[in-house]
Amino acid sequence: MTMIDNQIVNTINTAEPIAAPAVTPTLAPPLRADSTLVAAVGAFDEYMVRKGFSENTIKAFRNDLKIVQDFLGSDTRLHQVNTQHLHDFLDWLQHSRGKPCSAKSLARRITTIKVFFGWLHGIGVIGTDPADPVVQQPARTPLPVILGDPEIDHLISTAQAYLSDEAKPDARPYLLINLLLETGMKKAECARLLISDVDLSGADAVEITVRYPDERHAHKNRSMSLAGELAPIVQQYLEQYKPENFLFECTPRNLEYVLDEVGRKAEIHHTQVGFETLRFNFRGVGASTGEYDEGKGECDDARVALDYLLSVQPHAREVLLAGFSFGSVVGLRVGCADERVQRLIAIGAPARLSTLEFLQACTKPKLFVHGELDEIAPLAPLEDILQQLPATTNYQLVRIANAGHFFDDQANELMTAIREFAA
């Protein structure tokens, strides 16, 4: 789900239609059930600005609501809009508008109408929310096609052949592929690497440091080790390309071209060789098979993901396992029992719906971050459980003021708490 979708859905889920006394006086002119759609959209625009919605979110809402007005008519009265009209609108988007409507765009536009009409209903302008029966259709991003071990071996061999090419030896393909296989870094991270981020002084390893210029992303800064035998390859690359600032002085797209060329030479045809990251869903979620298993099978899922990550990062200096909501309970259960995990973070842990007795014997450092206004996983039951734990359980609880379950307007406070714990 995109950041826009998260903000939209959270507006519904966190009891944000705001009570009428707090909002109605600021509506100018006052809205009524017989107000026009265009008037309501204008008032909603003012509401978004007052609430501090991000610029991108406001722009997306505006564009989507303009399309709604094009279909329903700007002068349509609010009380005239019913659920069938909205279903007709969605059908028109997909089949009759004459413009493509991807699954992601459809999901966002459904969320837009649900938030807009939910807001009107919440402040008492309309008696019934016509969008409430409309079913959300979340866009599902297909899982990446990954390479098997034989294909990876062949890819490395193909890249290695570039090193000794008689016509034009080239160290870049071999360096790039090994860099990705050993670190799993993202494309943007790779493109931002500076020469100074590569430390060749160690006898047994090459140290790579990933740095984010924006302080908000400082928690993503990290150092990783490459096999020591890659040091001569790095030196060969530096001598060949003579970069002055960035390690790879080309665009991220050019790095994709390098990977694609090696993939084609390695005769890997079923997928394009490129940058990928690990994404995993619990069983029965997204494209994952199986069914919800009340946390038992989901713990197995988390262990499989942990096994995989450590298989590609066997020299990781520390493993910090973090989870949100239901995932936080799974993470705590798995992380407390697995000796490979050193620290744990639980965000919005639903204590009233979970059995957390296993925390009694868990002495690993744990951070609990919780919104004081969390209506889905109330704070009080978690406080009761934590207060009963012995001092040896080594935990800290950070309460975020005015935050609901999804930390709509408190993302910075949430990240600050995580960053301080993870430092």
Image (cartoon, rainbow, N blue to C red):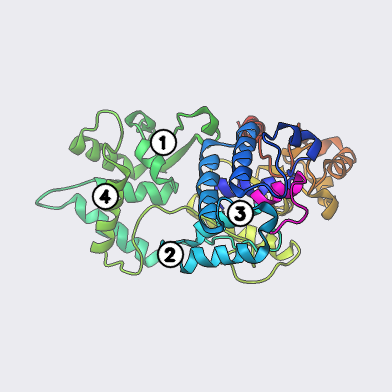
Cα distance, mark 2 to mark 4? 21 Å
| SS for callout 4 | helix
Disc 3 crowd, CA 10 A, few/some/many (<14, 14-19, 20+):
some
Disc 2 crowd, CA 10 A, few/some/many (<14, 14-19, 20+):
few
Closer to the chain start, of discs 3 and 2, is 3
Q: Is residue 118 magenta?
A: yes
Residue at mark 1 = 207
Q: Which residues are magenta?
A: 115-130
Query: Mark 1 is on which residue type?
Result: Glu
Residue 295 image position (x, y, % from top left):
74, 61
- Please report the residue visible at 41 percent of the width from the left and 36 percent of the height from the top: 207
Residue 194 image position (x, y, % from top left):
34, 31
Cα distance, mark 4 to mark 3? 60 Å
Query: Mark 4 is on which residue type?
Result: Pro
Nearest the camera: 313 or 422? 422
Between tags 2 and 1, which lies in front?
A: 2
Residue at mark 3 = 76
Nearest the camera: 31 or 402? 31
Query: Mark 2 is on which residue type?
Result: Val
Cα distance, mark 3 to mark 2? 47 Å
Cα distance, mark 3 to mark 1? 63 Å
Residue at mark 4 = 173
